[in-house]
Amino acid sequence: NGYTTNIPSHAFSVLSSGAYNIRSCYVNKRQNKVVYGYQPCQLTYFTSHGPTLDGRIKPDILSPGENVLTPRSRMDDFLDHEFIIDTDIQAFSGTSAASPITAGVAAMIWEKYPDFIRDSVINRIKSTAYADDYALLDGPLPNNVSGWGKIDAFRALSGEVTDYSLFC
């Protein structure tokens, strides 16, 4: 039916995160090779789109969620996979990578503005998001692919606008 969001991303109290690619490649030091992805800043293919069944826009925000470099557990045994960069770092992808970034920005906002309620934090994230050509591919924001745009932690905390055209 064209609706792809589901529980919990379309819940009324949830700020849902879509994902975009943060970098076009990374170096796998274990295999001594460059692993290429797709264009940086491009929205990922795996992010669910809205609207919700009752017509609300989802996702709410886009955060880095493809080729995100994260610490890795030394307990796993996936050493031959190209997403293992070295003994301490791995490339991680998915909305499960984007959501913690969104949550971290929300936590920083709440720390800076302790009197904010949940809706104030969500509104701050949405109102300080930015749009690039990829976020606008499906029309003006907000839309059911990019939500209110790409998260901008610096602007959410400082109010200063950043020129992202240098990165994308």
Image (tube, rainbow, N blue to C red):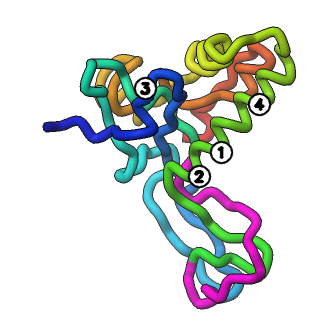
Residue 158 on the magenta span = no
* Left/right of residue 42 with respect to residue 81 in the rendered view: left
* Camera-nearest label, 4 or 3: 4
Which residue is tagged 3? 147
Which residue is tagged 1? 100
Which residue is tagged 2? 97
Q: Kindly state the secondary structure of the residue where label 3 is placed.
A: loop
Q: CA distance from mark 4 to mark 3?
A: 20 Å
Tags 3 and 2 in contact by the CB under 8 Å rule?
no
Q: Is residue 137 above or below residue 84?
A: above
Q: Which residues are magenta?
A: 64-82
Q: Kindly state the secondary structure of the residue where label 2 is placed.
A: helix
Q: CA distance from mark 3 to mark 1?
A: 17 Å
Q: CA distance from mark 4 to mark 2?
A: 16 Å
Q: CA distance from mark 2 to mark 1?
A: 6 Å
Secondary structure character of the magenta stretch overall:
loop
* Mark 1 residue type: Pro
Q: Quadrant of residue 27?
A: bottom right
